[in-house]
C-alpha cells in the first residue's frame, strides 16, 4: 500500500519546469520591463553603446599589429590564388579581381595612413564635409 501511495504523491506533486518556454518568455518579459522602465528615466542605450565601443576599441587596439599582419597575409594569399588560377589557364572573374585590388588598396591605406583615415571617418560621422 505504501508504494502505491508514494506514486500518487509523486504524480500530484508539481513539476519543476525551469527550462520551459513559458519560463524563458517570462524572464525576457521581466528584462524588457526593466529596460523600458530605466529608459524612461535614463538614456541607457547611448551609455551602453559608448561603454561597449570603448571596450571594443581598447581590445582591438591591442590586436592591431596582429590584424594588420593577418590582413597582409590574406591579401598575399588572394594574389597567389589569382596567379595560380592563371597558371592553370583559368582567369578569375572581374568582380573577384576588382575586390582583390580594392582590398589591397584599403589595407595599404590603413597601414600607412591610419590617422588620415581616422580623421576622415570622424569628419563624416560629425557631419562635416
Image (cartoon, rainbow, N blue to C red):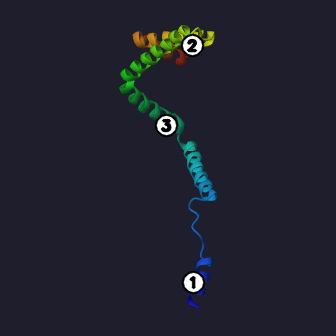
Query: Foreground residue, 76 or 29?
Result: 76
Location of residue 46 in the rendering, given as x and y in whole percent from the top left corner:
52, 34
Q: Distance between the Cα atoms at labels 2 and 3? A: 35 Å
Q: Distance between the Cα atoms at labels 1 and 3? A: 53 Å
Disc 1 packing (10 Å; few <14; some 14–19; many ≥20): few
Does 64 sit above or below residue 35? above
Disc 3 packing (10 Å; few <14; some 14–19; many ≥20): few
Residue shown at 48%/36% (left/top)?
A: 47
Location of residue 58 in the rendering, given as x and y in whole percent from the top left corner:
38, 29
Residue shown at 46%/18% (left/top)?
A: 74
Give SS at disc 3.
Answer: helix
Q: Distance between the Cα atoms at labels 1 and 2? A: 71 Å
Residue labelled with disc 3: 48
Tell me if residue 75 can be seen.
yes
Residue labelled with disc 2: 99
Residue labelled with disc 1: 6
Give SS at disc 2.
Answer: helix
Amino acid at each position: 500500500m505504501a508504494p502505491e501511495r508514494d506514486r500518487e504523491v509523486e504524480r500530484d506533486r508539481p513539476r519543476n519546469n525551469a527550462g520551459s518556454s513559458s519560463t524563458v518568455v517570462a524572464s525576457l518579459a521581466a528584462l524588457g520591463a526593466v529596460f523600458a522602465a530605466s529608459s524612461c528615466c535614463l538614456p541607457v542605450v547611448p551609455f551602453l553603446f559608448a561603454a561597449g565601443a570603448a571596450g571594443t576599441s581598447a581590445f582591438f587596439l591591442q590586436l592591431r599589429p596582429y590584424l594588420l599582419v593577418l590582413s597582409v597575409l590574406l591579401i598575399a594569399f588572394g594574389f597567389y590564388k589569382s596567379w595560380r588560377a592563371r597558371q592553370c589557364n583559368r582567369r578569375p572573374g572581374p568582380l573577384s579581381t576588382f575586390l582583390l585590388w580594392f582590398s589591397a588598396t584599403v589595407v595599404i591605406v590603413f597601414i600607412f595612413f591610419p590617422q588620415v583615415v581616422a580623421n576622415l571617418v570622424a569628419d563624416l560621422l560629425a557631419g562635416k564635409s
